[in-house]
Amino acid sequence: HGVDLRTGVAVECLEGDGHKVTGVKLADGEVLPAEAVIVGIGIVPAVGPLILAGAAGANGVDVDEYCRTSLPDIYAIGDCAAFACDFAGGTVMRVESVQNANDMGTCVAKAICGDEKPYKAFPWFWSNQYDLKLQTAGINLGFDQTVIRGNPEDRSFSVVYLKEGKVLALDCVNMVKDYVQGRKLVEAGAKPDLAALADKDRPLKELLAEQSPA
């Protein structure tokens, strides 16, 4: 698609003519001509006013299982909210995704309306890159093993992440059925047979049927 993707490369500086950028100079001295530069360096959650008001937090603002901050009647949702994620072993973290922001918003709206329930939404992510549909189910934090279903050279495969034999998450590339069915394996805390898991022709729902919740 005409994209020149560089990995393991450091940028030394941006070059310009005094009015606009003209190139990107790499650490090895190579200069990549450029008319525009997009810099993706991550974000810092803007929670200054909450922290100054006394809310607990370090990387973002801390919320409890109902998305409440430590301040009375103040909730926080989305990228700025750090919570104990059930799908990451209870690790306190921020989940930067549309799904998380929407589902946290629903949790808070119900709480305000008197239907208070803990936030237990399943984390998922997706992106379309040209002819590739990238889908992630779960969070692979702390995995100690991976199993590949399919062949990456065929541009259709899945990577399954496990910890102590339990399925934590899946990255699926043009494997929609794996994404849909693999989510159930994560939710069930399944420990499938690894040979069967690696067989791309074996539907994951069959492996789920063989499991009992961990």
Image: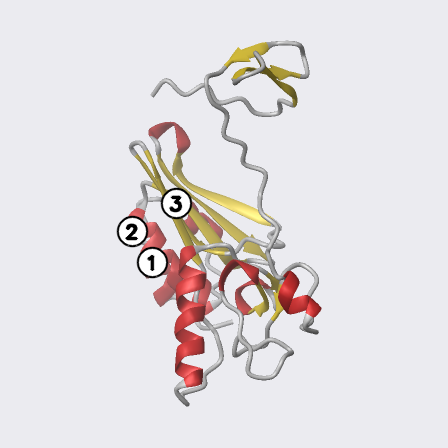
- Residue 169's spot in the image, x, y percent? 48, 55
CB under 8 Å between discs 3 and 2? no
Please, is residue 110 above or below residue 38 in the view?
A: below
Give the amino acid at mark 1.
Answer: Gln
Numbered mark located on residue 177 in the image: 2
Q: Is residue 42 left or right of residue 202?
A: right
Q: Amino acid at mark 2?
A: Lys
Furthest toward the top, the residue is: 30
Residue at the disc numbered 3: 172
Q: If you read the primary sequence from the N terminus, does the residue marked by circle 3 or circle 2 appear first? A: 3
- In the rendered image, the vertical position of residue 147 relative to residue 48, given as above or below: above
Relative to 138, say whether 23 is above or below. above
Instruction: Please give the name of the residue rendered at 54% of the width and 36% of the height, measured from the top-left corner.
Output: 40
Residue lying at 45% horizontally and 51% vertically, measured from the top left: 170
Residue 72: image location, x then y, percent: 60, 84
| Residue at mark 1 | 181
- Counting from the top left corner in percent of width and height, residue 86 is at 55, 69
Q: Of the residues shown, which amino acid type is indicated by label 3?
A: Cys
**In-front residue for pair 94/24:** 24
Q: Which residue: 44% across, 62% down?
A: 101
Q: CA distance from mark 1 to mark 3?
A: 11 Å
Task: Decide which of 200, 128 is in the foreground and name it.
Answer: 128
